[in-house]
């Protein structure tokens, strides 16, 4: 019902506007629809009762935008709907719904928006504005829309300053009984509490400075408010108690672009009552470009990951090495492959990853994804729950 | 002995005059290239829509469209912002490039799906631009410093120069460029020779239009690859020289905005 209503709303907006807007010519309206069909296959039986092996899912992502004032003013909205085998994976989210105005050297944004910070490939440490959509993506690159007021100020010598007022915290949602990548007891949405007395309504603040000096790109950020990552406590019975800590976090991200060699560094210092730690990722990416004279680029990526939380690092990336290779064919179909693995230097846990995509027809893209847990050490606190969750996924995305 | 000295001086003289002649040809070439670049100076800001039609050797085509904004700087290379508007799976993907007269360009890539900006290496000169027959270096701004020049010939108003890329990472050993002396030294045609010195590609400028009484812009650029028989047509439309950009229009935030 809700879905039908929203779809109707989009149709109204689309046709209603585009007719009106022709008279007021400088306004441009765009409507797009992305339809994704995905099939995830877990070749091992689930570790927990209720888990399945086949997970077909369908997602719909309509988006509508208005641009006027020569692109200095925009209104953008993107909604994401997904239907899957696991009840928790049937949900929808407003990814974007914001108004933006830019003038001279400043920019103002209000609404729900996505913001990405950082340079590393294997872990996104400094990236803190949005909550990860942990149900949709394994690598945390899919995010929930974050309500915000953002003000950006730019000066050519000093770089860009971004100020964020974040009035509401979005919870991280985890898989339900029938889903993969869950704990022994599925984590209910309400079961994760807040350290802050204002709960999700605590007003969070953040500021970031970003600039570049020749080959060096640098960002410094500060965040104060509800952490995006829940803090897990285990009682003697093995039950999990989780809450969102109230945190102060300082982040640094740095990239040096020396021709074909990229050197990358990200680090955070997070301070909360129960947890005070630093984490870092440092690495490189070297690209051999056009090696066959036909456009094939082969990149080699290596990153070292450190987290002072040790076993309590939710990502499990506390003393790990990421190794990978990126192949870009630069062909008409934009074929690209990312192959890699993360090996834990303490526990020898090894996770292998493949991501590949190619345009197979006009407006139709195929994506392959594989996450293979090669070895999971019994010392792993979180990953042990996922030891049966190696999967292969194929998806087709159609764009209208 | 005298004879030897004589012979020696004779050959030295010939050698010197050949060197002198080569220097003259180089100077003449540089003069023409400089005139061409000078004639196009002062456009300030420009925006244009592009359609790229890629054709494989069997004649099958695929299309992509993009928008390009260029901001001219006097003391350095131009700033350029490119946004893809189709196909839909790459719509909103955008690049920001600060070209430099000397040294490698600064370049950032914006990926709309995850709203991520990445600083990328610009050292890949010879690779194809989005699967087309245009290499990245074919599309970068024209700067005198990027080549050494040699005058080859003149036929009527057409002048032929040999241009050798300074950058060792260029995919070309040399280019033969045809300038039109009667039309502000605009470029009519470029033959590209690969590193083995065999003819690789020919770029033809079609349908020139004069904007603002000063700036010649071709409606179409046709690139033919002689070795693979593939071709790419770049069609330009909606040239606007009145856009009056500022530095603020070429920042990381502007790159993200352009993606909307």
Image (spheres, rainbow, N blue to C red):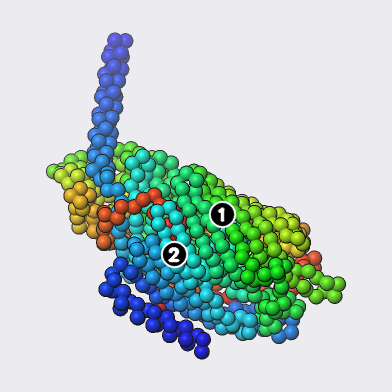
Q: For this rendering, which residue is in front, A262 or A101?
A: A101
Q: Position of residue A20 (x, y in %)?
A: 30, 77
Task: Name the side, left or right, on which A333 lies relative to A274.
Answer: left
- As drawn, the label of residue A100 is 2
Q: Position of residue B37 (x, y in %)?
A: 27, 42
Residue at 31%, 62% in the rendered image: B50
Label 1 – label 2 distance at C-alpha: 18 Å
How far from the left and from the top, in percent, is residue A342?
67, 61
Mark 1 Cα shell of 10 Å, populated few (<14), some (14-19), many (≥20) = some
Provide the residue designation for mark 1.
A208
Q: A319 and B14: which one is in front?
A: A319
Identify the residue at horizontal 27%, vertical 38% (top origin).
B34
Q: Is residue A97 left or right of residue B232?
A: right
Sequence-wise, the earlier of marks 1 and 2 is 2
Label 2: element kind: strand
Q: Chain of mark 1?
A: A
């Amino acid at each position: 019902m809700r879905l039908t209503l929203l779809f109707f709303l989009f149709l109204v907006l689309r046709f209603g506007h585009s007719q009106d807007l022709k008279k007021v010519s400088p306004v441009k309206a765009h409507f797009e629809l992305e339809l994704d069909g995905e099939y995830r296959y877990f070749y091992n039986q689930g570790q927990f009762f209720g888990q399945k092996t086949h997970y077909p899912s369908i997602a719909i992502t309509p988006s509508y935008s208005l641009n006027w004032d020569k692109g200095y003013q925009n209104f953008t909205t993107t909604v994401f709907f997904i239907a899957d085998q696991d009840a928790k994976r049937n949900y929808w989210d407003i990814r974007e719904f914001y108004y933006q105005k830019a003038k001279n050297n400043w920019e103002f944004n209000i609404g729900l928006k996505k913001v990405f910070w950082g340079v590393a490939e294997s872990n996104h440490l400094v990236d803190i504005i949005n909550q990860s959509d942990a149900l949709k993506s394994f690598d945390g690159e899919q995010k929930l829309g974050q309500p915000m007021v953002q003000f950006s100020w730019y000066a050519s010598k000093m770089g860009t300053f971004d100020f964020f007022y974040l009035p509401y915290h979005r919870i991280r949602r985890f898989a339900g009984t029938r889903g993969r990548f869950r704990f022994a007891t599925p984590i209910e949405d309400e079961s994760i509490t807040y350290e802050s007395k204002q709960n999700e309504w605590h007003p969070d603040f953040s500021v970031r400075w970003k600039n570049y000096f020749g080959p060096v790109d640098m960002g410094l950020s500060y965040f104060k408010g509800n952490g995006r990552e829940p803090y897990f406590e285990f009682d003697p019975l093995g039950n999990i108690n989780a809450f969102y800590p109230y945190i102060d976090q300082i982040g640094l991200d740095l990239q040096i672009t020396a021709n074909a060699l990229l050197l990358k560094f990200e680090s955070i210092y997070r301070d909360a009552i129960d947890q005070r730690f630093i984490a870092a990722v440092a690495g490189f990416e070297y690209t051999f470009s056009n090696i066959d004279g036909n456009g094939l680029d082969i990149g080699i990526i290596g990153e070292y990951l450190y987290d002072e939380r040790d076993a309590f690092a939710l990502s499990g990336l506390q003393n790990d090495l990421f190794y990978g290779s990126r192949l870009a064919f630069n062909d008409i179909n934009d074929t690209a492959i990312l192959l890699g693995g993360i090996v834990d230097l303490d526990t020898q846990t090894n996770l292998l990853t493949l991501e590949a995509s190619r345009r197979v027809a006009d407006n139709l893209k195929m994506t392959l994804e594989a996450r293979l847990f090669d070895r999971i050490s019994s010392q792993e606190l979180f990953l042990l729950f996922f030891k049966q969750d190696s999967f292969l996924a194929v998806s087709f995305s159609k764009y209208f | 002995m005298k004879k030897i000295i004589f012979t020696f001086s004779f050959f030295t003289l010939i050698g010197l005059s050949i060197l002198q002649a080569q220097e003259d040809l180089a100077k003449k070439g540089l003069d023409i290239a400089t005139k061409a670049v000078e004639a196009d100076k002062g456009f300030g800001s420009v925006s244009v829509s592009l359609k790229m039609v890629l054709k494989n050797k069997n004649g099958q085509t695929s299309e992509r469209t993009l928008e390009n904004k260029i901001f001219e700087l006097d003391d350095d290379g131009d700033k350029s912002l490119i946004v893809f508007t189709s196909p839909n799976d790459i719509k909103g993907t955008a690049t920001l490039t600060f070209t430099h007269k000397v040294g490698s360009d600064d370049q950032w890539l914006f990926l709309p799906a995850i709203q991520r900006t990445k600083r990328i290496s610009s050292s890949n000169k010879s690779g194809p631009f989005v699967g087309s027959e245009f290499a990245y270096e074919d599309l970068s701004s024209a700067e005198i410093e990027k080549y050494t020049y040699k005058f080859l010939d003149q036929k009527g108003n057409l002048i032929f120069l040999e241009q050798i890329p300074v950058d060792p990472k260029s995919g070309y050993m040399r280019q033969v460029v045809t300038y039109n002396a009667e039309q502000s030294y605009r470029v009519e045609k470029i033959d590209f020779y690969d590193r083995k010195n065999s003819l690789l590609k020919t770029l033809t400028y079609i349908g020139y239009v004069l904007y603002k009484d000063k700036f010649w812009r071709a409606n179409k650029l046709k690139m033919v690859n002689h070795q693979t028989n593939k071709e790419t047509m770049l069609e330009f439309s909606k040239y606007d020289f009145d856009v009056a950009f500022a530095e603020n229009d070429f920042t990381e935030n502007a790159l993200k905005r352009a993606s909307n």
